[in-house]
Amino acid sequence: MRKWVVLLLFVMFIGSLTGCASEEDVSEEGFLIYHINNAETRVESSAVELDGDSLEEKVEAIFTCLAMGDSTYKAPLGMGFSIVSWEIAGKSMTIEVSPEYSNLSGTTEVLVRAAIVRTLLQLEELEGIYFTKEGSPLTDNVGMYVGRMTKDTFIQNDGNEINTYELVKVKLYFTNENADMLVAANREKHYSTNTPLERFVVEELISGPSGQVEGIYPTINPETKIINVMTTDGICYVNLDSAFLSVINNTSLDLAANSIANSLLELNSVSKVQILVNGEVPEPFQGVLFTKE
């Protein structure tokens, strides 16, 4: 296991000597280092020339850059915690953070992870990042396991920013063990404000139960892809691909559709729901518009 302890004062001094050039010194095609803006509302990037030939040398140079802040932004590794160790196995990297990581606020914690993950996954040798703390998998501020993070975990916007993340509480409807009725479950999670809340709800339904609540089971085929989710005049149009029609766990298509509708109708922005498959209303739902009771 490769050890890396972040000593901030030392790192800030050697930063100019280890390939952490400023954006003015490199072309737009340089390696991007993600930082947190001073308001701690978003992540922004600047280009650097990254030193190092081996993967280990590159990772150490990246951690050096991530520990350097200035008057215009905050350093992700300058937020009061340190990286205790890191290890690479295959295409995945595990980062052990110090206990002080728990002192980060919810929003700041998400932005710190976004900055670190976005930066490291530019390395072609890596495809996923895990975080651990005190030897255990990292949990967020609502107690949910963070798990493996990939390039798709944090949505990038306008090529230069990662969107603001907000903590949202939604009510999702799954099914019971017999797949004959819906069961409600509350979920708290950070989501990108660039993503419509309605789409976030459908994404979470497709992902299935979190495992923290017993006795609930998924209603939607996990292979289902979202084509589009759009709300107009209170009507939420959910357009899915044909995988949605392939039911799982003996769940009926009607129950699957109702799990989507009931979950969306919990939102103040939605008063009716229309289910589409590949842009058309499937035969079982011809003339059906789900509404609040």
Image (cartoon, grey):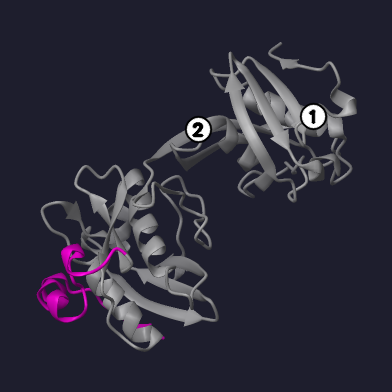
Would residue 55 be found to the left or right of residue 187 on screen?
left
Is there CB contact under 8 Å for labels 2 and 1? no
Q: Which residues are magenta?
A: 1-28
Q: Nearer the viewer, residue 76 or 5?
A: 76
Would residue 265 be found to the left or right of residue 27 on screen?
right
Q: Which residue is mark 2?
A: 169
Q: Which residue extends farthest top? A: 293
- Residue 12 in the image: state x and y as whole percent: 13, 71
- Is 67 inside the magenta-drawn segment? no
For marks 2 and 1, the one nearer the N-term is: 2
Estimate how packed mark 2 is, as few (under 14), some (14 to 19) or many (20 or more) residues with alpha carbons within 10 Å. Answer: few
- Residue 153 in the image: state x and y as whole percent: 50, 54
Question: Which kind of residue does numbered mark 1 sit on?
Answer: Glu
Question: Which kind of residue does numbered mark 2 sit on?
Answer: Lys
Q: Quadrant of the N terminus?
A: bottom left
Q: Which residue is mark 1?
A: 280
Identify the residue at image location x=58%, y=30%: 198
- Is 12 inside the magenta-drawn segment? yes
